[in-house]
Amino acid sequence: MAADIGVRADFSRIRYAQCWEDADILVAALAPQPEHTLLSIASAGDNTLALLAQGPRRVVALDLSPAQIACLELRVAAYRRLDYPEMLALLGARPSARRADLYARCRPYLSLDAQRFWDAHPDLIAAGIANSGRFERYLRLFGTRILPLIHSHRTRMALLTPRSPAQRAQFYAVWDNRRWRAFFRLFFSRWVMARMGRAPEFFRYVQGSVADRLLQRAQYAFTVLDPSANPYLQWILLGHHGPALPYALRPENFQPIRAHLDRLEWLCAPLERYLESVPSGAFNGYNLSDIFEYLDLPAYHGLLARLADAAQPGARLAYWNMLAPRRRPDALADRLRPLSDLATALYAQDKAFFYSAFVVEEVC
């Protein structure tokens, strides 16, 4: 992650206890191969582990937040030490009263820094570690306090009923009342989100209405996509994952992730500083989350050039735009080419409705 945001925002606490980017489209974009070395923004660790499930030769996870690295470390320990249902329970994907005991079994597999972090937060362990971030608390407030003011419990749960596209459109016509639009625009306004969900510094380069963009994308997720298969919507409504699970938590991916844990390494450092020590041609792909949102355009362009320097020809960069538009500039046309058709097709499948664009670019 970029160094300057580390100065302007506080990263000592967990901001994201889950990855709120759809790993299905990330994996499809990067298409990891056995000979690949990948670099992944760690965040909470889910999408880094999703890439690991594909069996690349090496995955380097990077984050400038010690709290986010602690999230990744505990996930790695859970995959290593627990069985599949226990791992889901520790994360909070399933209800459990045994999380303290499950953590105790994972603790010896953590670094001293991660042990100190989690030992100091038994409340986060008890709640399920995937529920413990600032953004998760913000979304749960929407699910538990705001939505009940708009719709009955029966209507809210009916959102997750499997339907045809035509039936979903009919249901949304009922859902989309004045209270829904008013409360949504207020809760997801720049002012409220900056104070409760994301740091104010994350909005420095945002233009236009935040809430209106998110409302349009939510309508797409409720109608064109299938809410009954959407783990992100399910978590907001239920407070835990229902039948639909994100990529790294699906049963078929548990053993592949566990089998490849020795190919994963992680580092707490700014991305720019790390790239200074990396030789050219080191990487075949990058999961960059939405880190470019936090940079001005000159810094973004400079970081793109550094990433191209550290990549092999044909390496892909995958990243999301949430509120600030970021795409390869013309000045880098000889070094990066946009894979626009692929990105557009994958974005049409993106189950996380927070993002305004998904970008895939390839090193020339």
Image: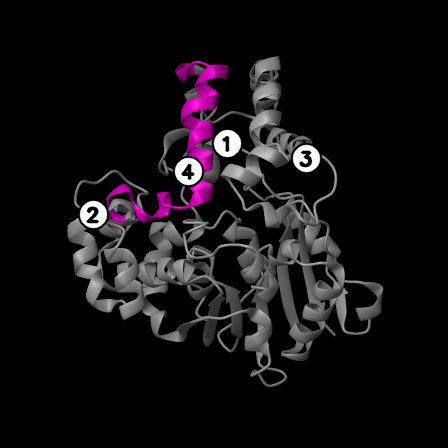
Q: Secondary structure at mark 4?
A: helix
Identified at 68% across, 35% down, the residue is 213
> Which is more toward the observer, 345 or 318?
318
Q: Earlier in the sequence, mark 1 or mark 2?
A: 2
Which mark is on residue 99? 2
Residue 264 placement, left or right of 339: left
Q: Secondary structure at mark 1?
A: helix
Residue 304 placement, left or right of 162: right
Confirm or deny contact between disc 1 and disc 2 (CB under 8 A).
no
Q: What crowding class fits label 4: few (fewer than 14 Cα within 10 Å), some (14-19), or many (20 or more)?
A: some
Which mark is on residue 213? 3
Q: Amino acid at mark 2?
A: Arg
Residue at mark 1 to residue at mark 3: CA–CA distance: 19 Å
Q: What crowding class fits label 3: few (fewer than 14 Cα within 10 Å), some (14-19), or many (20 or more)?
A: some
Q: Earlier in the sequence, mark 1 or mark 4?
A: 4
Identified at 35% across, 74% down, the residue is 262
Q: Amino acid at mark 4?
A: Arg
Which mark is on residue 137? 4
Closest to the camera, between mark 2 and mark 4, is 4
Question: As displayed, is residue 346 above or below residue 65?
Answer: above
Q: What crowding class fits label 1: few (fewer than 14 Cα within 10 Å), some (14-19), or many (20 or more)?
A: many
Identified at 58% across, 61% down, the residue is 288
Residue at mark 2 to residue at mark 3: CA–CA distance: 38 Å
Closest to the camera, between mark 1 and mark 3, is 3
Q: Earlier in the sequence, mark 4 or mark 3?
A: 4
Q: Secondary structure at mark 3?
A: helix
- Circle 1 residue: 227
> Which is more toward the observer, 290 or 338?
290
Question: As displayed, is residue 122 above or below residue 76?
Answer: above
Quarter holding residue 215? top right
Q: Earlier in the sequence, mark 1 or mark 3?
A: 3
